[in-house]
Amino acid sequence: MKKSQGQVLLGISIVTRASVLAILIGLALNLKYLNWKNGYNLSRLVGLAAGEWWKLFYEIYDGFFSMFGDPLTIAQSNAGMTWSIRIMGVPFTDPIAFLSVLLKNHHIEVGFGLGLIIPLTLSLTFGRVFCSYVCPASLLFFSTSRLRRFLLKFFYFPDVQMSRGSAYGVLCGGLVLSYIFTHGVWTHILPYFAIGQTIFHAIGFGTLSSCFVVILGFVLADLLLGNNFTCKYLCPTGQLLGFIGSKSVVSIKRDAADCIDSCNACTVVCHLSVNPKVDETKNCSLCGECLIACPTKCLSIGVRP
Amino acid sequence: MKRRNFISSFIIGLILPFIMPLVSKFQASPLVRRFLRPPGAKSEKEFLDLCTACGQCANVCPNQCITLLGFEEGLDQLATPAIVARSRACILCMACTQVCPTGALEKLPMTEEGKKSVNMGKAVLMEDICFSYHGRTCGACYRACPLPGKAMTIGLYEQPTIIEDACVGCGLCEQACIHMPQAIRVIPRFEIEQNEASKS
Ligand code: SF4
Ligand code: SF4
Ligand code: SF4
Ligand code: SF4
Ligand code: SF4
């Protein structure tokens, strides 16, 4: 059976998000590798000091980074969290990090500004794709929404409807907080940053970050208040990217001739409350769920006419 | 109606982040521990304005000496990098200064000159507990100092003397001191800045 476009996209999105998660874990493990590389530079010593598994890990990292040049330098060109990260020396900057720093300082480091290029280009071309293809938190919320669907068979949970204004409220509130205190407050506001911190603290330092509580809060909100409540109403990043990408080059398209008037499947299934039925494209993250849900397959993803 | 909905939601959203300052009030009493900022850090205020808490410096430190703070030092230092010299001091490899994206840590070269331009704090010696000043020759701190003879000199019976102008505050002496508690410790730069500000 040939897979439909929607199924392919959903598959890709799960793979890419899982890779992002793997990268975050890998970066935290980088800390151990660097320490051993700098201190021992010999896998046998790592084996003696930390055990056979860590020796294997050390050898894999060493082999991998050696492919690109001096392993120590290459390993050090990878660092950070989804908020501001450097992969093989290429910087990525979260637009909110940029706003937050800009508000407090009049001078912006060139590399920090350049880090905006890839995220902005991506949102201007594909819309809110960050949410379905990159954000490590969305994988968690994806599973939570499946759990919620299952639990709804036995219990009743409300489905709170708000306006997306709340996410802009969180954005402004966060900016005020970061202006008063430090940019670090975003670790406890942005879901993906909280996940990055938790992973980094757990693996790098062996401690449980207080961000864990925040993640728990978001998961509970998703479970009890509504499907993907956090992404729809609380996360400022998703909202901002949706705004930036509201006129994206690639978007969802509907073949009006095939669309059934009484059908509502796409609107019901969308986890970000986009309404493809009335050709709404703002906030669409190209996840492909509505493409699967549509009985006549009249939805597709392509270049905006 | 739609606008009213937007505004009320906006206000709910606006309030949400402010739960954090309230919650952080309930923390256990803060750990009174001295910590240093990584090398290349600007003056404390500038540093806090610039640091985005991205953790890149902690991620590349081959010495694993940088940790990221939690709520213990208050909200205005949340998730910023810190070095506790007694548990692990900075070896001045300058890797962290190369990656900091926002310039909170100034880029410093990995040379002798680069090392000398660091200002993380100043070491102070407590002669009353130092072994060398009590007839037991020690000198462990001198052996650890990355700027021997410049930041620290050593005399009869391995008695150390700190030359304050040249000390960069890396904390290696504090880590190395074999006396418990440490007879030599680094006063962080922000503490010195505070003291000077309160004096003037
Ligand atoms: S809305 Fe926020 S938390 Fe949700 S997927 Fe997008 S970036 Fe991640
Ligand atoms: S200079 Fe090197 S050892 Fe010191 S904090 Fe930076 S990365 Fe770590
Ligand atoms: S790399 Fe720079 S901005 Fe990032 S946490 Fe360290 S000091 Fe702060
Ligand atoms: S005296 Fe201590 S803190 Fe100062 S440079 Fe030497 S080792 Fe570092
Ligand atoms: S290591 Fe400690 S006890 Fe030994 S000489 Fe230095 S300060 Fe004194």
Image: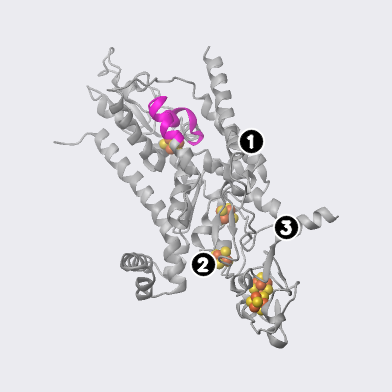
Q: Position of residue A109 (x, y in %)?
A: 61, 52
- Beta carbon of the mark 2 residue lies under 8 A of ligand 2: yes
Secondary structure under badge 3?
Answer: helix
**Amino acid type of the residue that numbered disc 1 sits on in the rendered structure:** Val
Which scheme is used to colour this image of the protein? one colour
Q: Secondary structure at mark 2?
A: loop
Given the image, on which type of amino acid does mark 3 rest? Glu
Quadrant holding the C terminus of chain B: bottom right
What segment carries the magenta color? A217-237
Nearer the observer, A302 or B110: B110
Q: Quadrant of ligand 2?
A: bottom right
How far apart, in angstroms, are the residues tagged by discs 2 and 1? 35 Å
Measuring from the top left, give residue B57's x and y in whole percent.
54, 58
Comparing A167 with B143, the one in front is: B143
Location of residue B6 by image quarter: top right
Task: Report which residue position mark 1 lands on.
Answer: A176
Asked if the stretch drawn in magenta spans residue A284, the answer is: no
Q: Is residue A187 left or right of residue A68?
A: right
Report the amino acid beneath label 2: Asn
Residue B191 shows which numbered tag? 3
Please tell me in which quadrant of the rendered image residue A7 appears: top left
Answer yes or no: is residue A4 visible.
Answer: yes
Left or right side of A16 for B54: right
**Which residue is disc 2 drawn over?**
B63
The subunit letter for the residue under badge 2 reads: B
Callout in the foreground (2, 1): 2
